[in-house]
Amino acid sequence: MFIETCIAPVNIALIKYWGKRDEELILPINDSLSMTLSTDEMCAKTTASACSTYKEHRMWLNGEEVPFEDNPRAMRCLKALQRLALAKGESLKFPLEWKLHIVSRNNFPTAAGLASSAAGYACLVYTLATLYGIQDEELTAIARQGSGSACRSLHGGFVRWHKGEASDGSDSIALPVVTSAHWPNMHVLILVVNDSRKKTSSTKGMQRAVETSDLIKYRAKQCVPQRIQAITEAIKQRDFETFANITMQDSNQFHAIALDTFPPCVYMNDVSHAIVSFVHAYNAAVGLTRVAYTFDAGPNACLYVLKEHVPSVLQAIHTSFPNDAAGSVEYVKGIPIDGTASPSSTPTTADAILNGNFTLPTNERNLLKYIIHTKVGLGPQRLTKTDSLLNPSTGLPY
Amino acid sequence: MFIETCIAPVNIALIKYWGKRDEELILPINDSLSMTLSTDEMCAKTTASACSTYKEHRMWLNGEEVPFEDNPRAMRCLKALQRLALAKGESLKFPLEWKLHIVSRNNFPTAAGLASSAAGYACLVYTLATLYGIQDEELTAIARQGSGSACRSLHGGFVRWHKGEASDGSDSIALPVVTSAHWPNMHVLILVVNDSRKKTSSTKGMQRAVETSDLIKYRAKQCVPQRIQAITEAIKQRDFETFANITMQDSNQFHAIALDTFPPCVYMNDVSHAIVSFVHAYNAAVGLTRVAYTFDAGPNACLYVLKEHVPSVLQAIHTSFPNDAAGSVEYVKGIPIDGTASPSSTPTTADAILNGNFTLPTNERNLLKYIIHTKVGLGPQRLTKTDSLLNPSTGLPY
C-alpha cells in the first residue's frame, strides 16, 4: 500500500473569477488574482492511498462516503494525473490500475461558504500527485478542471490565474505573484454572517451571467486587465491603500455583474451591506484606508487588515456589531488577538468617531455568527504518516 | 390676484435615468423611458398665486413653509418660465415683478420614496406655466432643471426623455411614446417596504456613479439605446412579455451600476430581493411572464401587471408575504380589487405551485408596509378654483 497525506489552503480572490468561456475544461473569461490563507486556521486535508487489493475507487468527504467514479470532475483530475505519471515514464511507484481510497476533511465549516471546493480540489490533486510521485507545473491546470479557483490554492502568497489563450486550456494556469513572506503582516478577518437563503450555485450563477449580462463582457475585457496590473503593482510595493481600494471595487463589481444577470443572483444580504458601510465609515473615521472587504458568492465578509491594526479594527467590529458571544474564543477563532481587542476595553478614537457616524440598519445583536482571524500563508504541504486520515491496516477512514 | 391649481402625476422609469453629463442643467448621459401613473391614486397638487401685494416669493410644501428664493432649482424653473412668458410677449396677465405664493401637497407619503420630487417639480412648472398663460413644448426642458425625471411627468402614458445633444440642454426634452389610452389595462402594484436605512440621495449617488463606475459608461452607450428601441416597440405592440423582461433587466442593471459605484450605493434590501425572487418564482409557476418588477433608488417594488391578472397576483403576494393587515383597505390602497383577491380566498394553481417552489428568506410577517394599486394615467391637469390649496382672501394655505 502506498499512502500520502497533504493539506491545501483556502484562497480568497481579490480580482474575481466569474464566467467561463469553456464549461468542460473550466476556462475563465478573465484572469483572477487571490491571496492564499494560512493553513494554520483553515485547510483541506486529504489522505490518498493506493493498494493492489482495493476493488474500486472510493472517497470519504467530511466523514461521509461520496461517489468518486461517478464524479466527472474528480475523475477528470485523476485521469489527467495518471496521463502525466505515464508521460514521466521512468519509474512508476505502483501500477496505474491500482484503485485508490481517498479520505478528505475540511477543518472549517463547509456550510460557511468559504471556498471549500477550491481547497478540496487543490488538496485532492496535490495529494494524488504526491502519491504518483509527480512534481509538475501542470498541476494547477489539472486542479482547475476540478474547481476553477482550486488552481490558485496550489501556491502560497498572492497568486494569479492566467486565463490563457489555448483552446485545450494548457496555458490556463496559476502562477505565484509574490510569496507569503513578501507581505507577512497581511491579516484577514472573516466575518461569518447568519444567512438561510437558498442561493444560486457559483457554477450556475456564472453560466447565467455569461448568457444574460451585457456588463460582464465589458468587465472581462476592459476592467479586469487594468485591475490585475494595478493590484499586482500595489502588492509588490506593499501599498495597502491601493490594494484595498481595488479589492473593494472588484468585489462590488463582481456583485454588480451577479445583479445584472437575469434572473439576478444576489449573494450579499443586508448584513453584508452593513459590513460594507461599516468598513467605509471606519476608514473615513481614521482618515486612512485601513480595512478592505471582499465578498465571494455568499454573504460572508473577508476583511483585509494589516496585523498592527487588527486589535482596533476588531474592537470597532465589536462596537458596531454587538454579539452576546463577543470575548469568547468560540466567537473569535484563529490567531489569538492581544488583550486590547476585548469587547469591554476602552473604545479607540476611531470607535468614538464611528459611533457618531455609523448607524446599523437594525438594532439587532448577533448579526455575525463568528469571526476567523487568519493571515496570508503557504501553498499545499505534505504531512507525515502520523497525520493520516486513513487506517493503513483497514484501508478505511479512522 | 391671479390663482391656478393643477395636479401632476408620478412617473416610474422602465429604462432608468442614472448619471448626468451636466450637473447644473441636469442633462443625462442616457435616454430614459417611463410610465405615468394615474393621478387618481397618487399626484402632486399645487396652487400658485400672484398678487401685487405679496412681499416675497413664498412656498409651502406638505403643510410646512419651505425656502423658495434660496432654492436654486426652483428659482431656475421660475426664471426660465418668466423668460418664456416674456418671449411670448403679447399679453402678460400680470407684471413679472409680482411675487408668488405657492402651496403644494403630495397625496402620498413623501417618505415612501416614490419619486415625489418628479411629480412635485412637474406640478410646480405646469402650474406656474398655467398662471403665466404659457403653453409650450419647452416646459419639459424647464421641469428637467428642477428634478431630472420631472420632465417625464409632464406627459401621460409612456414617455421618453431624450438625452439630447445640445450643450444648453434645449433638446433634452421628454416626448410621449403612446398615450395612456393605448394600453389602458396596464396596472401597477406598488409594494411599500419597511426600511430605516440611511441611503445615498439620487443626486449624490448618480454623481458618484459617473465618477467611479467603469460599467456606467458601457451601460449608457451600449445597453440603454438598444433597450429603449426594444421596449418602445414592445409598448407599441402591447407585447407584455418583452416589456416585462426589459423592465426587469433594466432595473437590475441600474442597481448593478449603483453597486459598482465606490463606495457602493445600495438601494434594495433583503425584502426587495425577496420580492424579485417572488416575481421570478410566480412567473415560472404560471409558465408565463405575468409580472414585472422595477425598483428606483429605494427598497419599494413597483410591479407591472395587466388588469385581468391583478387579483391572482395580489393573492399570491398575500400568500408569500403574509401581513396582519391584509384584507383591510388601509393595506391595499387605490383601485379596488374584486373579491377573489382577499387573503382568505381559495389559493390559485399558481399559489399552490409557488408554495412548493418559493421560500421566503425569513418567516417574518409584515415585511410590506402597504400596497398601492394604480395604473397608467394622464399627464398634468388644471383644476378649478374650488380645488385651491390657498385661501385667496389671505394669500396663505388653507
Image (cartoon, coloured by chain):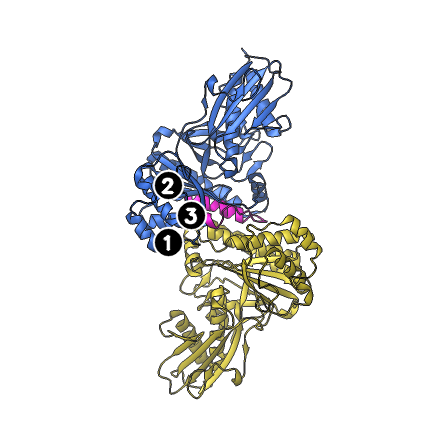
Chain colours: A yellow, B blue
Please give the chain letter of the residue carrying mark 3.
B
Question: Where does label 3 land, which residue?
Answer: B275
Q: Residue furthest top?
A: B91
Tell me the amino acid under the disc marked 3.
Ile
Would you say B304 lies left or right of B87 here?
left
Q: Nearer the viewer, residue A17 or B380?
A: B380
x, y percentage for residue A261? Answer: 44, 51
Question: Where does label 2 land, which residue?
Answer: B327
Image point (38%, 70%), residue name: A72
The quadrant of the picture occupied by the N terminus of chain B is top right
Which comes sooner in the sequence, label 2 or label 3? 3
Q: Nearer the viewer, residue B353 or B23?
A: B353
x, y percentage for residue A87? Answer: 44, 79
Tell me the amino acid under the disc marked 1.
Phe
Q: Residues within 10 Å of mark 3 (few under 14, many from 20)?
A: many
What number is the disc on residue B358? Answer: 1
Which residues make up the magenta segment? Answer: B248-271
